[in-house]
Amino acid sequence: MPGSPRGVRGVRAPRGPAVTGSGPGRRAADRQAWIVSTLHALGFVSVADLARQLGVSQMTVRRDLHRLQATGRVRPVHGGASLPPRELRSALPEEACTEDQERVARHAAGLVGHRDTVALDAGTTGLAIARALPASFVGCVITHSMPALAVLTRERTGRVVALGGEFLPARSAFVGPTTEAAIAQLRARTFFVSPAAVDARGLYAQTPAEAGVQRRLLDIADEVVLVTTHETLRTSAPALVAPLDRVTAVVCDRRLPAGLAAALDRVGVVPRVVGA
């Protein structure tokens, strides 16, 4: 088929070599060049998305990734591939976290056992938790956050499960049916949720697509820890993720508003206020 295949849904594919050729060797070389080009544009791609966009089987994609791994051009992760750590550092911009976010993230990371399986939300608070995980952590992290994936795959020795799907630029995260289907097969001890907004009625996201991913992560977690700062409490967002009774613990940087504190008290949750 002439021309380059489309990119991951919702993201324009990078321009690169066409996936054509006169024989299997040439076709494989073109596929692999396109995979590397796509990784430089997105940071992570799933095997399922690559197979669909390239028009080949998932087994063929895995063989291509194995060959690219042998040459040091990609790093396979659960369900897909990312750039090697040295290239992720330059390919993906670092997102800035506030001091308040870093403070609550350090406290949240302190709740993680060194062999736990945890899920991290998208956004800068989830990224701050990824950075704050202790050096002794050798467990597993599940996340749909591209910046968190960049940190985890270059700085951590534990397992990383990368959730692919449609890329949402506003949150630097993957969302949609592909992401949700992958989550359904997993389990986590703790999900550290950092929604766009929180009030006495529940947790909120800016888009229904992200709310769907957060709900699926809530479903697979034994415990749900809301990690938030006062800035989030001043924000409104339209898409309801879940009511407050889905939360088992709260880590925040300041005393909560009376209405929110009372709502949490009704569901038996005592906030952990991490002061300056």
Image: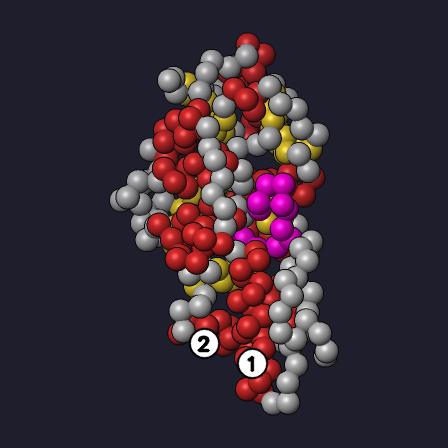
Q: Position of residue 26 (x, y in %)?
A: 58, 85
Which residue is outermost to the top?
258
Residue at position x 38%, y 17% from top? 275
Amino acid type at image mark 2: Arg
Q: Which quarter of the rendering shows the C terminus?
A: top left
Measured Cα–Cα span from mark 2 to mark 1: 10 Å
Q: Position of residue 53 (x, y in %)?
A: 66, 68
Residue at position x 63%, y 46% from top? 168
Amino acid type at image mark 1: Ala
149 lies left or right of 12: left
Q: Position of residue 85 (x, y in %)?
A: 40, 57
Circle 2 residue: 67
Indicate yes or no whether the magenta region holds residue 56.
no
The residue segment tinted magenta is 160-173
Q: Which corner quadrant of the image does residue 76 belong to?
A: bottom left
Which residue is outermost to the left?
136
Circle 1 residue: 28
Residue at position x 33%, y 33% from top? 110
Q: Is residue 184 above or below residue 207?
A: below
Q: Give the mark, 2 or 1, whose residue is nearer the N terminus.
A: 1
Q: Nearer the viewer, residue 218 or 39?
A: 39
20 lies left or right of 148: right
Q: Which corner quadrant of the image does residue 77 belong to?
A: bottom left
Residue at position x 64%, y 34% from top? 205
| Circles 2 and 1: CB atoms closer than 8 Å | yes
Q: Dot 1, crowdedness within 10 Å: few (<14), some or many (≥20)?
A: some
User: Quick check: can you spot residue 30?
Assistant: yes
